[in-house]
Amino acid sequence: MINIKSLTNYKHVQKVYCLALIMLLYSVTYGKNIYISELEKAEYYTNVNADSALIVLNNLEEMLSVNNNEKYRTELLILKSYTYRNKQNFDMAYNISKEVINSAEQIPDTLLLIKAYTNYGIMNFVVFNEAESRKYLDKALELSKIMFLKGKTTSSDLLKSYQNIIQHLKRFQKYHEALIYSDTCYNLITRYNLGDMSKAYFEVNKGYFCLKTNNETEALNYLLDAMHYFENIAPDNYKYNHRSYLPTIYSYLGEIYRKQERYKLSEEYFIKSLDTLKAYPQQHNHKPYILEQYAWLLYETGKYNEAIKKLNESQYLTEQYFSAKTLNDSSFQKVRNQYRGELNVRMQELIVNSIEIAKKDKAILRFRIFTIFILSAIITIILIFKIRRTSKKHTVEKKDIIAKQKQATELVKLKNRELTESTLKLIEKEEIIKQLSEELSKNKTQTSSHLLKQISQKSDNMWDDFNSRFKAVNQDFYKKLSEKYPDLSSNDLKICALVKLNFSTKEMSNLLGISNESVQKARHRLRKKLSIDRDTNLTSYISSF
């Protein structure tokens, strides 16, 4: 016989159990909804008010410390790293992004891993760590392709991965490769009808790369179209402040008009860029570049004092950007010192040029006053001093010729300095490639042999690229040397070119792909062919050609 009392107790326990299960499921679902809601709120604040975003994220982190959900915690840290990057606290942003990589790789969630790789890759190109940046952005792109083919992500997600690669190439000035990736993006946009917003971003990047590859007309068309689109976006049509791209577009237009010598229009756009930038603090890391380009416009239009002020301001902001408080990591310190050195070189270059031109302007002003006085006297007694006036005219023409020759010489020096600077950067990269080649040579495989062959071919092209640019700046250099010293070989002329630009023995060996000892022997043979004794400075002598 069934015990009615025990059956009643059993049913009561069942009810309690079911109620507890329902409450548990509700708390989990409710807690998840709260987390997602708060994370979306933090994501919005990140693009509006980074401090508010951090408050929300810290509260969420405390909440997650209770239930120990590693996936949610990783998503939170990715957003936290992005927020610190917006605040320009790169030390925190970098450390968090690096921590996220380790945790994301332990979680079986490919979409989360794509976010982690992307964040770390972007953080590395922010601080000029080219190799790490490209490595992780490529990883993110490959995973994005796989997930897209599986139908797990959208074409818009894949487009973002390509755009991150483009931003990397833009940062490291690989404009021709960036144009190839831009065309891939355009194909995605048109094939999957990704909308006007995506097309506008494509036009900005395409316009910039056309500008940097000296196609100003095409660049102008792309950038003007993009500008009109972003200027006409209604406030409720953008969640992430897409209009914040306007300062960048205005600065690119200013740069184009400067190259076209439409100086008034160029200045209008640079001023507009700086004014618009005030409304978008998350874009302030672009301000040093904008100020530097504006400084060159002021320099070209003869406003030397203002140019130096703008360059000083750019340098100050860059110092803040890479300050010791912001970047405590030793690799960051190295980047900061390298970037500071480049800015100091530009500053010294501008100061020297402005002082020399200021001296010329002063002499020209005096000359003009003197000329006006003489011309006034000549007008009064033109018949008496006709011969004298003719003599003065010849003097003026002679001085003008000398001034133009001097100006042309200074321009060549300026271009040679720019050529030297860019070549030294290539040499630094070549040293890294050489180290990689040595490592690959130790463990030769079919793949490594193929890579070594490609590296060798690219190294050979470095001299050809340098030589073509050198001849463009110093057009008669080889001709003058060969006329005076017809026995000079092509290798001798190479050494002469590098000596003229004051390259060290090590820099010559890296560029020419020979040993330091071979460079020293080549310099010694060159002295003999030029009949130069030990007391004569080789660099000064060759620079006279």
Image (cartoon, rainbow, N blue to C red):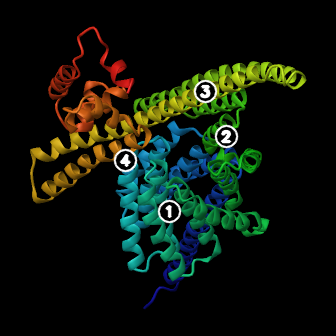
Question: 233 left or right of 316?
Answer: right
The picture quadrant where one finds residue 359 is: top right
Query: What residue is drawn where x is 51% and y is 27%?
Result: 345
Q: Is residue 60 above or below residue 420?
A: below
> Can you tell which of label 3 and label 2 is closer to the viewer?
3
Amino acid type of disc 3? Ala
Among numbered discs 4 and 3, the one appearing first in the sequence: 4
Task: Give the percent coordinates (x, y) of residue 117.
Answer: 41, 56
Amino acid type of disc 4? Glu
Q: Is residue 258 above or below residue 516?
A: below
* Residue 423 badge: none
Mark 3 lies on a secondary structure that is helix
Q: Are marks 3 and 1 in contact (CB under 8 Å)?
A: no
Q: Is residue 531 above or below residue 49?
A: above
Query: What residue is drawn where x is 67% and y is 52%?
Result: 257
> Can you tell which of label 1 and label 4 is closer to the viewer?
1
The picture quadrant where one finds residue 242 is: bottom right
Q: Are marks 1 and 2 in contact (CB under 8 Å)?
A: no
Task: Give the percent coordinates (x, y) of residue 449.
Answer: 13, 55
Residue 158 visible in the picture: no
Q: Which residue is mark 1?
A: 163
Query: Separation of disc 1 and disc 4 at Cα?
Result: 17 Å
Among numbered discs 3 and 1, the one appearing first in the sequence: 1
Q: Nearer the viewer, residue 388 or 352?
A: 388
Q: Which residue is mark 2?
A: 297
Mark 2 lies on a secondary structure that is helix
Question: 179 left or right of 398?
Answer: left
* Residue 132 badge: 4
Task: Give the percent coordinates (x, y) of residue 499.
Answer: 31, 26
Among numbered discs 1 and 4, the one appearing first in the sequence: 4
Amino acid type of disc 1? Gln
Q: Which residue is mark 3?
A: 403
